[in-house]
Image (cartoon, grey):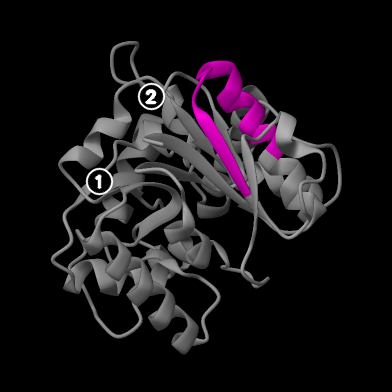
């Protein structure tokens, strides 16, 4: 089959999130094939997913083993903590020209997102987020995925993006950086966008997992995520001693962001 989406979900909590995301995909992109890789068998999910496949084994980044198993020629991989907000349009056509497409991670000044395994790359080459990835079936991509898995397993790390950053920097693989609306991590960006700037397409937020990590009500909509992110942003401003909406404070913030001091490094780690 030519085009399709895959999810990898181990455990009931992640399977529930995958169902929620797949439902949003079905509603916005009817007719697009959707597969699931899981450790829970079919679990009644052939109504939601076209095919359900077993994961090779269970570990925190088993997705790296599932990516090359996709039955599609052009595959969109989605983390379970996503919601598809709009039609994907012609996004699959990107991999007619590139082997891989994915978006920059956010918090690019932070040590977390600057980290590589062995290499130090320029500031303008941060980690790329692996929660939304479009890729094609090709020999180059097969070899790339195999090397990513090998290096990751040897590293002993938890986060796969550290290894991915090094590998992309060293590789001759043709890859494309998606616009942020295809992997919307910083949802408060919507407050700054004008109507013709962009169309939010794929929401990817850890807020959708808050009920798993911190208890409390489940977050299921873009509006809920946006409300929570606005509160978090206000708190971050507060923690830096800066108040949003004050021009003088905004000018101070700009000067702080352009400096590399103990204060700014502490803010970036927050």
> Which residue occupies 77% across, 53% down?
41
**How far from the left and from the top, in percent, is residue 22?**
62, 32
Callout 1 secondary element: strand
- Residue 25 visible here: yes
Alpha-carbon neighbours of circle 2 within 10 Å: few (<14), some, or many (≥20)?
Answer: few
Seen from the viewer's position, the closer of residues 147 and 241 is 147
> Which residue occupies 39% across, 82% down?
151
**How far from the left and from the top, in percent, is residue 158?**
55, 75
Q: Earlier in the sequence, mark 1 or mark 2?
A: 1
Mark number displayed over residue 177? 1
Asked whether disc 1 touches disc 2, contact meaning CB atoms under 8 Å apart, the reply is no
Q: Nearer the viewer, mark 1 or mark 2?
A: 1
> Which residue occupies 47% across, 58% down?
69
**How far from the left and from the top, in percent, is residue 79?**
55, 48
* Quarter assignment of residue 11: bottom right
* Quarter assignment of residue 119: bottom left
Is-magenta flag for residue 93? no
Vertical placement of 250 versus 12: above or below? above
Seen from the viewer's position, the closer of residues 27 and 156 is 27
Which quadrant would the C terminus be assigned to in this image?
A: bottom right
Spatial CA span between label 1 and label 2: 21 Å
> Which residue reaches farthest top?
195
Residue designated by label 2: 192
Is-magenta flag for residue 32? yes
Which quadrant would the N terminus be assigned to in this image?
A: top left
Vertical placement of 15 versus 142: above or below? above
> Which residue reaches farthest front?
1
* Left or right, 13 with reference to 129: right
Query: What are the residue bounds of the magenta stretch?
Result: 19-36
> Which residue occupies 32% across, 55% down?
256
Mark number displayed over residue 264? none
């Amino acid at each position: 089959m030519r085009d399709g989406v895959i999810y990898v979900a181990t455990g009931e909590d992640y399977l529930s999130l995958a169902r929620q995301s797949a439902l949003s995909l079905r509603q916005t992109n009817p007719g697009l094939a959707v597969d699931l890789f899981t450790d829970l068998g079919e679990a009644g999910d052939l109504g939601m997913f076209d095919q359900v496949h077993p994961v090779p084994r269970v570990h925190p980044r088993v997705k790296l083993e599932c990516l090359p198993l996709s039955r599609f020629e052009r595959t969109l991989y989605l983390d379970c903590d996503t919601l598809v907000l709009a039609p994907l349009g012609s996004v699959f056509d990107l991999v007619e020209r590139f082997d891989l497409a994915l978006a920059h991670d956010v918090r690019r000044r932070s040590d977390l997102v600057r980290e590589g395994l062995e290499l130090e790359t320029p500031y303008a080459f941060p980690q790329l987020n692996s929660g939304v990835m479009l890729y094609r079936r090709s020999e180059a991509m097969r070899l790339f995925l195999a090397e990513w898995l090998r290096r990751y397993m040897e590293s002993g790390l938890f986060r796969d993006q550290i290894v991915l950053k090094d590998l992309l920097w060293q590789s001759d693989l043709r890859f494309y950086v998606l616009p942020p609306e295809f992997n919307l991590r910083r949802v408060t960006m919507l407050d700054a966008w004008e109507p013709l700037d962009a169309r939010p397409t794929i929401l990817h937020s850890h807020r959708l997992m808050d009920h798993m990590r911190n208890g409390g009500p489940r977050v299921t909509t873009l509006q809920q995520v946006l409300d929570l992110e606005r509160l978090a942003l206000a708190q971050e401003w507060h923690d830096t001693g800066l108040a949003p909406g004050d021009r003088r404070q905004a000018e101070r913030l700009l000067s702080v962001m352009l400096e590399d001091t103990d204060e700014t490094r502490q803010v970036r780690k927050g």
